[in-house]
Amino acid sequence: MCGIPWIVNDTANIHYSAVLSAVFVNWQGKEWNPEVGNNRGFCRRFFSLTFCCLLYSSIWGVAIYQTASITTKEGEEIPLREAIPNFFKSPAWAEMKQSFKELYEFYQVHGFEKLWEELVEKLDPTGEANAYKVLKVTDNASEKEIKASYKKLAKQWHPDKHTDPQKKAEAQEKFMEIQQAYEILSKISHKRMRMNKKDRRGGEDHDRIGKRRNAKDEF
């Protein structure tokens, strides 16, 4: 198994894998005794297993790093060893670092409990933040502004406006993304309106109960 990464790197290295396996068996196979091995302490066995797993994973990692490639949407294959350094220079990585920095500063001020709430909000589980970005509006935009931006973008990216198959497919994907973003914001808006109505009703009921109690006390 230890020789598999070399085979991945170059199938001509298969003989190295066979030699490595033979040496290892000859070295440990004759002397290994299950009864003696079981006398070792748990911590020693655990750390030995962990070390072997890390060593084996690192060999796999090097093999993948040297041989794997990423295919772009244009069909160009970029070696992983070139793509990874480019990623660390990309705007996405800069934005990620900035987000981690902001979260750390937030943790220093507000503590872990509030940090978790902020982290959940940053991860955008509802898709609300991304929907605002897709529709090119701010998070405090009114329903009227959101609807106007949606109509404008939907008209701009409507697939029927394109005849070229590639551009038509791109427009179709963008058009669906715009529709989905608008649906997400609409659902969130309706949900918040229902919650506000419930809160108002709850407040009115609480006021009525309070008035009745006051009336009884006065009586």
Image: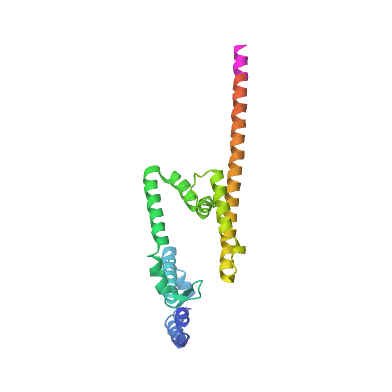
Q: Is residue 38 above or below residue 195?
A: below
Image quadrant in which you'd find residue 162: bottom right
Query: For the stretch drawn in magenta, what is the main secondary structure?
Result: helix
Residue positioned 59% across, 32% down in the render:
200
Q: Is residue 83 magenta?
A: no
Horizontal and vertical percent position of residue 83: 42, 71
Horizontal and vertical percent position of residue 4: 47, 80
Residue sitting farthest toward the top: 219
Q: Is residue 139 above or below residue 90?
A: above
Residue positioned 59% across, 63% down in the render:
161
Horizontal and vertical percent position of residue 40: 43, 68
Q: Is residue 37 above or below residue 138?
A: below
Quick check: 12 left or right of 152? left
Quick check: 216 left or right of 26? right
Q: Nearer the viewer, residue 103 or 196?
A: 196
Q: Nearer the viewer, residue 107 or 202?
A: 202
Q: How many marks?
A: 0
The quarter of the rendered structure image containing the C terminus is top right
Q: Is residue 55 visible?
A: no
Quick check: 195 left or right of 90? right
Residue positioned 51% across, 54% down in the render:
130
Q: How is the image coloured?
A: rainbow
Q: Is residue 80 above or below residue 15?
A: above
Horizontal and vertical percent position of residue 86: 39, 68
Q: Is residue 69 visible?
A: yes
Q: Magenta region: which residues?
A: 212-219
Image quadrant in which you'd find residue 217: top right
Q: Nearer the viewer, residue 177 or 47?
A: 177
Residue positioned 58% across, 44% down in the render:
189
